[in-house]
């Protein structure tokens, strides 16, 4: 009996320590009309890189009914800013602002989400980021893999990137931000956009370049991050999202696996000119062609950083040709499409070619390794 009493404090201490170790950061990705389904998936899957985070999609109804009390950080993904704020409604907007300013919750806006967090005249925004979006009339200015650089403040948050002068991220018609005139708190610029995107006829030049790419702002007790581009959908850069989740909560920054920290795989700007859009369209058509056409088309789609690579490549694991299936599996891993895990598991299960099956099993293991890999800094 004495032995039981002696060990009880140790057991209790171990239980409490275990409870502390499993205290997850709760992240809610907003999911309402106007959100692109793939933008939502991109944000959700990026958060999953961090083993100490739990993520789920949340709606305006859940926010207003108190079902998101446990959420520490909200992410407003790409899509349509006006549709997202319209879905929130006046009461939802008031609720979010209160939770950030008074309760200290964090909030991150990506592309359309950055519009939502801005303080833009005649736009249904939340006035949280200290920034104003300009040139909205030319919002449809183009897309591509754009250049950006980190400021000194950004290098402190992303030390893995400090030795690379130029970095790259997917971009799709994001906002052009400037300091808001009546902002309660000025933003800190973490990264600067370097690409001049004016690919659609009528859009002005020298509008996007040398503007903020990532900003950080204090909003009452909370912190706000705005991102103009889409690192969450960019292979090798998706880990920036969970890192920023930690930043807005003042949590310890941790290192992530080399399976996801791969900024070196991008070496040049790729802007979707009319000619490149035509090449992209041809590659999409060739996915229905011969084996050779399919193999080339898939590689071309990934090499050109096509926006729809994420939805075009995984289904090719169900092609009739084993070589096509294998390349699709390998490219799915390159794209870090952890949302396609079920597709790859199914492909491995039904694969009859033993050599191909072995390679696909390796691809499956690599894809699983992307989730929750990190070490303390």
Image: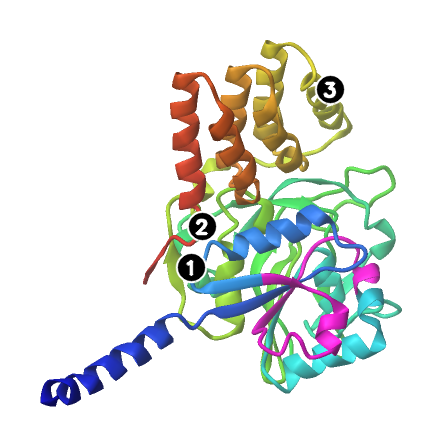
Point out residue 319 in the picture as x, y percentages from the top left corner: 60, 20
- Please name whichever residue, 269 or 241, is drawn nearer the observer in this view of the structure: 241
Residue ID at (45%, 58%): 50
For marks 1 and 3, the one nearer the N-term is: 1
Residue ID at (86%, 37%): 201
Residue positioned most to the front: 1
Position of 21 relative to 143 (above/below): below
Q: Determine crowd level at label 3: few under 14, some 14-19, many 20+ residues with C-alpha closer than 10 A.
A: few
Could you tell me how far apart the alpha carbons at marks 2 and 3 are, in whole angstroms?
A: 32 Å
Label of residue 371 in the image: 2
Q: Determine crowd level at label 2: few under 14, some 14-19, many 20+ residues with C-alpha closer than 10 A.
A: many
- Please name whichever residue, 69 or 298, is drawn nearer the observer in this view of the structure: 69
Label of residue 51 in the image: 1
In which quadrant will I find the C terminus?
A: bottom left
- Please name whichever residue, 245 or 210, is drawn nearer the observer in this view of the structure: 245
Position of 40 relative to 130 (above/below): above
Point out residue 211 in the picture as x, y percentages from the top left corner: 66, 57
Position of 19 relative to 305 (above/below): below
Could you tell me how far apart the alpha carbons at marks 1 and 3 are, in whole angstroms?
A: 39 Å
* Badge 2 vs badge 1, beta-carbon distance below 8 Å: yes
The question of residue 172 being in magenta is answered with no
Point out residue 69 in the picture as x, y percentages from the top left corner: 62, 79
Point out residue 311 in the picture as x, y percentages from the top left corner: 66, 36
Magenta region, residue range: 56-84
For marks 2 and 3, the one nearer the N-term is: 3
Q: Which residue is mark 3?
A: 285
């Amino acid at each position: 009996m004495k032995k039981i009493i002696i060990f009880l404090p140790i057991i209790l201490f171990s239980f409490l320590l275990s409870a502390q170790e499993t205290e997850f950061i709760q992240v809610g990705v907003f999911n309402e009309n106007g959100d692109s389904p793939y933008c939502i998936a991109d944000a959700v899957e990026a958060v999953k890189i961090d083993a100490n985070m739990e993520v789920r999609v949340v709606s305006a109804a859940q926010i207003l009914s108190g079902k998101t009390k446990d959420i520490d950080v909200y992410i407003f993904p790409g899509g349509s800013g006006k549709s997202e704020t319209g879905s929130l409604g006046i009461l939802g907007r008031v609720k979010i602002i209160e939770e950030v300013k008074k309760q200290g919750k964090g909030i991150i806006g990506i592309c359309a989400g950055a519009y939502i967090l801005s303080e833009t005249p005649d736009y249904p925004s939340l006035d949280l980021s200290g920034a104003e979006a300009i040139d909205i009339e030319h919002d449809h200015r183009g897309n591509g893999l754009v250049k950006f650089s980190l400021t000194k403040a950004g290098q402190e948050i992303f030390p893995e990137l400090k030795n690379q002068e130029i970095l790259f991220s997917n971009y799709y018609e994001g906002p052009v931000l400037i300091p808001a005139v009546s902002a309660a708190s000025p933003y800190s610029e973490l990264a600067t956009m370097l690409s001049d995107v004016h690919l659609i006829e009528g859009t002005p030049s020298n509008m996007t370049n040398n503007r903020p790419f990532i900003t950080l702002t204090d909003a009452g007790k909370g912190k706000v991050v705005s991102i103009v581009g889409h690192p969450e959908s960019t292979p090798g850069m998706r880990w920036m999202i969970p890192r920023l989740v930690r930043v807005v909560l003042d949590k310890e920054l941790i290192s992530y696996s080399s399976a996801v920290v791969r900024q070196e795989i991008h070496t040049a700007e790729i802007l979707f000119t009319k000619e490149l859009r035509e090449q992209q369209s041809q590659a999409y058509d060739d996915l229905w062609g011969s084996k050779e056409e399919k193999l080339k088309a898939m590689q071309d789609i990934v090499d050109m950083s096509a926006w729809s690579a994420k939805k075009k490549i995984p289904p090719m694991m169900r092609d009739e040709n084993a070589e096509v299936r294998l390349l699709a599996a390998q490219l799915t891993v390159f794209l870090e499409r952890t949302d396609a895990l079920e597709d790859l598991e199914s492909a491995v299960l039904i694969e009859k070619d033993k050599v191909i099956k072995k390679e696909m099993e390796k691809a499956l293991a690599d894809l699983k390794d992307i989730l929750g890999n990190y070490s303390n800094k």
